[in-house]
Amino acid sequence: VQTFLSAQGDPKGYFVLLQLPLTPQLIALDALHADAWLTNMLWATSYVLLVPPFLAVLYAFGHAVQWLIARLLLSAQ
């Protein structure tokens, strides 16, 4: 959040900072060569194909981080 606030009125810089969370998803799509099979699809079709897997991965990642933090806190006591 602090990084976003540091743009201080620079709309282009603010827009670039807002795109940073998308970078890992774009890297994953590039690694899968998804541009070859997404090129001729409607945006709605590609949205339906891409959102559920990314949502599941992000949920699992959040769950793993929460589990790790809880485990570290319990072992510290």
Image (cartoon, grey):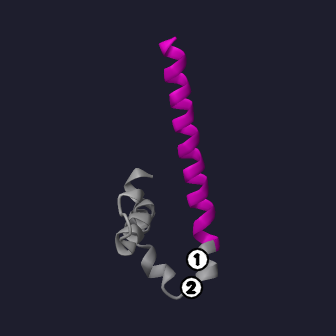
What amino acid is at disc 2? Met
Front position in the image: 59 or 1 = 1
Magenta: main secondary structure: helix
Residue 11 placement (x, y as % from top left) = 39, 73
Residue 35, compared with residue 58, is above or below; it is below
Q: Secondary structure at mark 2?
A: loop
Where residue 61 appears, x then y in whole percent?
Answer: 53, 45
Q: Residues within 10 Å of mark 2 (few under 14, many from 20)?
A: few
Q: Which residue is mark 1?
A: 46
Dot 1: what SS?
Answer: helix
How far is mark 1 from mark 2, CA to CA?
6 Å
Of residue 71 and residue 50, the one placed in the foreground of this image is: 71
- Looking at the image, residue 6 sits to the left or right of residue 46; the answer is left
Query: Is 54 inside the magenta-drawn segment?
Result: yes
Judging by the rendered image, the residue that carries numbered circle 2 is: 41
Q: Quadrant of residue 66?
A: top right
The disc, 1 or 2, on the residue closer to the chain's N-terminal end is 2
Q: Residue at x 60, y 65 (%)?
A: 51
Identify the magenta region.
48-77
Residue at 50% from the left image edge and 80% from the top image edge: 38
Position of residue 1 measured from the top left corner of the image (x, y, whole percent): 45, 52
In this view, the residue in front, 27 or 10, is 10
Q: Are marks 1 and 2 in contact (CB under 8 Å)?
A: yes
Q: Amino acid at mark 1?
A: Ser
Q: How many marks?
A: 2
